[in-house]
Amino acid sequence: MAGNFPISAGRPYPLGATFDGDGVNFAVFSEHATKVVLCLFNDRGQEVQNVTLPERQGHVWHGYISGMRPGQQYGYRIHGPYKPEEGHRFNPYKLLIDPYAKRLTGHPKWNDALFGYDVKDTAGDLSFDKRDSAPYMPRSIVVDPAFTWGNTPAPQRPWDETILYEAHVKGLTRMRKDVPNAGTYLAMASDPMLDHLTKLGVTAIELLPVQAFVNDKFLVDKGLTNYWGYMTYGFFAPDPRYMQNGEIAEFQQMVARFHSAGIEVILDVVYNHTAEGDEKGPTLAFRGLDNASYYRLAEDRRYYINDTGCGNTLDFDNPFTLRLVTDSLRYWVETMHVDGFRFDLCSTLGRTNGAFDRDGPFLRAVRQDPVLNRVKLIAEPWDIGPGGYQLGAYPAPFAEWNDTFRDDVRRFWRGDDGMVSGMAARLSGSAQFFDHDGRAATSSVNFLTAHDGFTLMDTVSYAEKHNEANGEDNRDGHSENFSDNMGEEGPSDDPKIAAARTRRRRNMIATMMLSQGTPMLLAGDEFGNTQNGNNNAYCQDSEIGWIDWEGADKAFFAFCAKAIAFRKAHPILHQRRFLHSRSRLIDGAPDLFWRKPDGTAMTQSDWDNPKGRLVMAELRMASGTPEYVEREGALMVVLNRGAAVEVSLPDPPKGQHWRRRFDTAEEAVVGDFDGCLIAEEAVVVFVLEEKPA
């Protein structure tokens, strides 16, 4: 599709290529360019017409082509100064994708022509390369994003009812033999997958990056790929590798099917950096459009600020960079109907003038935006820049990944000394981080594992990481995982070790589901998936990174589903308000009371005892949540990392009694007796219930 199209002035808005039914308006930002050329391609990828955008309003170049239809392939060539020492890297020999492109023909194919400089010149990035990059670049495609959504509304599930499930589009389904088109968007929401997720009980699926991303050259050179996808270069375009027929409607259909099953869709988005890397990286879009505007540059403007560890950092102090990201987010909500976002390295997005500011331009823009402030927003609250670790610092309505929860739960169940106080803090919602400025008790996203690190099975099977397959001599990945191989490194045929590992995993899952906050389960943990000790499978588009369904532990899946159902059945476990150990107005009972095994109150010396191995919490609904007070009496949650122990429960009110309703000890009989023996290494919950008449 292409012809000899005439061009008129058009409009400077909206940015991108917009089909209006009669033609297409093109608008693109560049403050420092001297000329913007629109390049049109036919369906065979041949460049057939170049048209200079005729108008400029402010820093937006624009033009309109009447008669053009969706499906037209295009790109840009931008003229301007090539002065790296001043921060400018314009090179019209390099075809650029539209940063607002909604669909792409594919991915860059690594070739020296992709670089704005001559990679073999001794002057390095100060040199200028005249090779045409078009044969190696994907083209942007004009789309009509209209989609018939039907009558199924978005779930709009409250945070206190949310249970997240982190998954990779390809990895989740690649090894499912009963799923058609495995590894695609359509496969994600196939009947077998929806059946699995609904039986498990999760309410939202958090997808690893699906915006168009690049396979890093150094990985391709080693025969590997960027499996996770944290090298984005197309913030509006679903990555083509997960499509069956190349249509964005496939992504929309996936979302619609998830919604019909009551499951929300959260996207892991990477707006902190782009796939163009540092000064020696390729010229794909932003660098060639306006390097000095899109990126934070060092004092020597040849170089980039690298607070992300990925070579560059987007500049959110620039209004057009901020506009790009907020426009992208709104597009995914309004056109693709996603329900929220998890922001990779969110501290970078919160920086202004180089420093993190919880009231910085991006965080302020999102909070005031009527489209974005109503969806779920999750921060990964760190980057590698100065002052980058900002757990608890984000404003409402943001929730935050809580790595302290992961570490403290692992250490407690591993048997580390001095973990009672930390475990109690995690169980009660990590209030020391999040209980400020009216933030909800759901603000802590509690996880045991995530894509980055060991799986749950590997956490109890490996004491050391085993990342040799990544080709970096096992140097990559975190060395301290607070893991425990339980007596043998890797898989074991010893039934005692296998049983101990199962118990440990049950205890950790139970701890997460019994804790205040928002739980997040890593896909595959519910049935014992392993990565063979690889804790950094970012480049493993292989059986290491894919989920093994044939080896699924059905009994453990049933336990996880039971733990999730128990959480859902007891609002005390997922409250919106923090618990403060204060007496409630309704009955004078404290909403949180910490007990020793003998039933008496914990003292400071008990909290400080390094050999403490038991946490015992009496929980009630916080004051101010009257809708649940009558239905929920109290729960006694006991986490026992030590030897078997008898615990004393407080005398129940008249007409009530304590009943054991949850126990991770396989041999325990739940619900049939009032005994208070807690097995060695077990989690038990007693429920204060009305006695039967």
Image: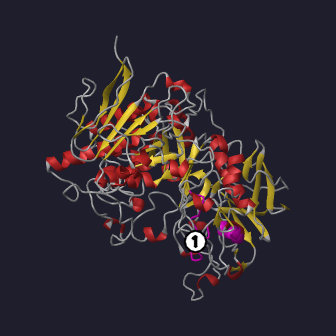
14 lies above or below 471: above
Amino acid type assigned to the residue bearing label 1 in the image: Asn
Residue 272 among magenta residues = yes
Residue 3 among magenta residues = no
Left or right, 207 with respect to 553, comes to right
Left or right, 105 with respect to 98, comes to left
Q: Where is residue 49 in the image (x, y as percent from the top left)?
A: 72, 62
The stretch of residues the image draws in magenta is 270-292
The kind of secondary structure the magenta stretch mainly shows is loop
| Residue lying furthest top | 693
From the viewer's side, name the closer residue of 144 and 43: 144
91 lies above or below 271: below
Q: Which residue is drawn at 51% across and 35% down?
A: 575
From the viewer's side, name the closer residue of 306 and 192: 306
| Residue bearing mark 1 | 306
From the viewer's side, name the closer residue of 107 and 366: 366
Which quadrant of the structure image shows residue 222?
bottom left
